Amino acid sequence: MKEGNSPGGNQGAAMEGTGGELGGQGNWGLEDAPGLLARASLPIMPAWPLPLASSALTLLLGALTSLFLWYCYRLGSQDMQALGAGTRAGGVSGGPRGCSEAGRPSPGSSGETGEGPRTEGLVSRRLRAYARRYSWAGMGRVRRAAQGGPGPGGGPGVLGIQRPGLLFLPDLPSAPFVPRDAQRHDVELLESSFPAILRDFGSVSWDFSGTTPLPRGWSPPLAPGCYQLLLYQAGRCQPSNCRRCPGAYRALRGLRSFMSANTFGNAGFSVLLPGARLEGRCGPTNARVRCHLGLKIPPGCELVVGGEPQCWAEGHCLLVDDSFLHTVAHNGSPEDGPRVVFIVDLWHPNVAGAERQALDFVFAPDP
């Protein structure tokens, strides 16, 4: 019998094969190394095919991106809707209900309670939306204003006589009357436009007797004997009134600091009849300065701001910080006729360009 066919030989070959498969004792040579390395690298569980894994990862990333974009859209939409609702309700109106001889009434500016925290939340959310789109650079004062109350430290302003109803921008120089040189360009432009603006008033004027319906363009009286015709109301142009007053509209378009894209911005004619009086009140923010161009100033007219009395002069501008407590009165006789001024809301000269851009975004007019 040949050696290769013996039972002992077969058993030895089988033993060698078993030992080699299980990693036990056996006789291995260099020629067996590639096979051993291949066996050692085999995965315990089979992996997905590479194209399938790549497709699944792409789908997952796409779904996460879509979810994130949807969330950002919803957040922005809710902020815009909330701000719009607040503006329509008067909570962020730029209209001065106090001194407010031009603009819409504002609960905040009249000292009513209940609007502060809600408006503050809207301002903060809109400011964060602005910072996400642009930057926080230069936003220190605006950020503090959005987080704080209507005055320094959340309380009243200077000596308790400066009480802006909606927005107090800290560290602004505070004085009831602002020097003309602070807005020299706009003051000189308005004064040079005095004849054209006066002619415009003559074309829209009426007898102000109160016995006839209000003519087209004139707003209901803020108080007995106090009328106004606005070319801009809460940052929005009033096209029909602007067409009727081309000289005044042309002057407004030439101003450098007019708050024309902000709910705090108004412009128009203000009429006060003899015997009429607007009691002490404060405007909505100290970030603006009201420019009064005197058109018709009879005797007995008075403006008191922060306890300081002043009077208008025909053809000249008076710059007023209406966030201070102020009173307007016409103490003349009926024969003197009405007091007429053209009022324009300008940016406070110490509000920086970046701050103006942010506040225009936060207090954008109703769409």
Image (tube, helix red, strand yellow):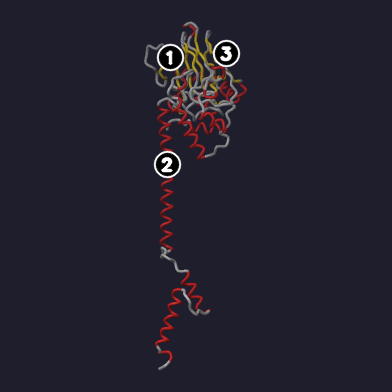
Viewport quadrant of the C terminus: top left
Q: Position of residue 227 (x, y in %)?
A: 44, 16
Instruction: Check disc 2: other Cα within 10 Å, few if <14, some if 14-19, many if 20+.
Output: few
User: Where on the picture, by quarter, is residue 135?
Assistant: top right
Instruction: State the SS at label 1.
Output: strand
Q: Secondary structure at mark 2?
A: helix
Position of residue 89 measured from the top left corner of the image (x, y, whole percent): 40, 26
Instruction: Name the residue at 41% across, 11% down.
Output: 209
Residue that carries the numbered disc 1 in the rendered image: 223
Amino acid type, callout 2: Tyr
Q: Nearer the viewer, mark 3 or mark 1?
A: 3
Q: How far apart are the two marked residues, 3 and 1, measured between alpha carbons?
A: 23 Å
Q: Residue most toward the right?
A: 181
User: Is the residue 145 above or below the residue 157 in the image?
Assistant: below
User: Disc 2 or 1, which lies upstream in sequence?
Assistant: 2
Name the residue beneath numbered marker 3: 308
Q: Quadrant of residue 139?
A: top right
Label 2 belongs to which residue? 73
Q: How far from the left and from the top, in percent, is residue 232?
A: 47, 25
First in residue order: circle 3 vs circle 1: 1
Closer mark to the observer between disc 2 and disc 1: 2
**Hey, what amino acid is under mark 1?**
Ala
Question: Please, is residue 60 above or below residue 172 in the view?
Answer: below
**Crowdedness near tag 1: few (<14), some (14–19) or many (≥20) residues, C-alpha within 10 Å:** few
Q: Measuring 44% from the left and 42% from the top, which residue is drawn there?
A: 72
Q: CA distance from mark 2 to mark 3?
A: 50 Å
Amino acid at circle 3: Glu
On the rendered image, what quadrant is the N terminus found in?
Answer: bottom left
Whether pointer 3 and pointer 1 mark residues with C-beta atoms closer than 8 Å, the reply is no
Q: Is residue 170 visible?
A: yes
